[in-house]
Image (cartoon, grey):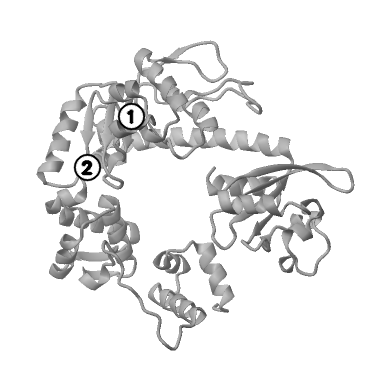
Amino acid sequence: MTDLLCNSLLAQIQSAYALVTPALMIEKHSPLFNNFCLEAEDPRTTPVCDLVPEFVGLENTFREVLKKGKTFDLPLINKAGNSYHCLVSPYDNPETPILVTFYNRTEFANLKQEILQRENEIRILKARLTAQSRNAASNLIGKSPALQKIKLMVERLSGIKATAILLQGETGTGKSTVARVLHYASAAEKDPFIEINCAALPETLLESELFGAVKGAYTNALQDRTGLIEAADGGSLFLDEISELPLALQAKLLSFLETRRFRPLGSNREKSVDIRLIAATNKDLEKEVEKGAFREDLFFRLNIVPLHLPALREMDEDVILLAEHFIRHFNLQFNKRIKGLSPAAKRKLLKHSWPGNVRELSNCMEQAMIFKDHGWLEAEDIALRRTEPEANISLPATGLNLETLERNLLLEALERAGGNKTQAARLLGLTRDTLRYRLEKHGIA
């Protein structure tokens, strides 16, 4: 579940929740959390298992969350005899890695179902809007022989509605962009392009997300739900990270590809659709087949039209063209007046190996332009990811004050970012919440 969805659920059901540190101390909590606690002047000074009577003896449960990332749903009864549920789950923040939430199970489940349905509707609407900008999406930048091969394949496929296309390439090579290009090169204006990342959802949700579900198919399935396969009817369905699709769903997807028919979860009626399936992966699927992690028959079905996307290091002549394209793009987005790259900046870009490929180049240009308004981008404006091992840093004989070092780094990042905390967090590789915590820790306003 996304952070946005999680926060939305907490806000709507007015949850009593708390963020807990690795030492099992409460760092942050909602006002309603006090209703479940013993009286304390400051809940942050008392271990959570001592503060909540029903948590006595549950220290090992919290440690399981820390060590193994497990989630526990605990049915509890308070001294007044009232029953409720408590969710103890991992939270993506090293300072507060545990989220504790008290909630009403029925209310939570109903809201979760409603929000997932709304997210599905929003995804479908966004896909339809994206189809209207087909010319912008089909602009592949570059003149290298490797890219020319990709363009030639796209042209050939534009007149053929292949049932399956497999895109393979390293992370950041533009598989999502090429998938859109393939769709827009042959789609009508109204044809939908639906995208889903197979690694983004658990198996229990992924099946209903893809194939849909009828009312009553599972607990809290309160209404019929249209799956993404049906939503893509007449257009294209893009399955990113297809290698992460669970084996059980691989079998169901294979059956659909062979018959073009499927059954929504809980239904005894088949539906048929006409879609082009585009799958993408950054893994070697043949090796995944050898390991037993991917079905061989599904691989053969997807590999009818294979398309390998080259790494950026294989397209040296395209690096500058792409960088200048991103400069034009971010000039418009940020209202900047950057003229282009200086000769020294070009040399710096060409020397880099780009392990993150086009995505890394895009992020690099975006970061450089955030801190400059006009003129030429110079070599010193461009911060590149290190591709070689860091040099050993020796500890001075007099020792090192880590607190002082951290404080100085925070101040330097804020100064470079012009006081913008979001950009300072990005420079330090922190989330905004973690940066805020560290600033408060050092008394930096």
Residue at image point 11% right, 46% down: 144
Give whichever of 253, 125 is nearer the camera: 253
Residue at image point 46% right, 65% down: 422
Q: Amino acid at mark 1?
A: Val
Relative side of 106 to 425, left or right: right
Q: Amino acid at mark 2?
A: Asn
Q: Is residue 404 above or below residue 82?
A: below
Label 2 or label 1, whichever lies nearer to me, is 1
User: Quick one: which residue is furthest to the right in this view?
Assistant: 80
- Judge the density around disc 2: few (<14), some (14-19), many (≥20) Cα neighbours within 10 Å: few
Residue at image point 61% right, 50% down: 65
Q: Residue 66: give x, y in percent of width and height.
A: 59, 54
Q: Which mark is residue 443?
A: none
Give whichever of 286, 300 is nearer the camera: 286
Q: Which mark is residue 139?
A: 2
Relative side of 233 to 304, left or right: right
Mark before the other along the chain sequence, 2 or 1: 2
Distance from the alpha carbon under mark 2 to that under mark 1 = 34 Å
- For label 1, the SS is helix
Tell me which corner region of the image, top left, top right, bottom left or bottom right, holds residue 266.
Answer: top right
- For label 2, the SS is loop
Q: Quadrant of the C terminus?
A: bottom right
Q: Residue 316: give x, y in percent of width and height.
A: 14, 53
Q: Is residue 65 above or below residue 50?
A: above
Tell me which corner region of the image, top left, top right, bottom left or bottom right, holds residue 28.
Answer: bottom right
Relative side of 40 to 72, left or right: right
Residue at image point 76% right, 69% down: 42
Give whichever of 408, 142 is nearer the camera: 408
Q: Is residue 174 above or below residue 230?
A: below
Q: Which mark is residue 289?
A: 1
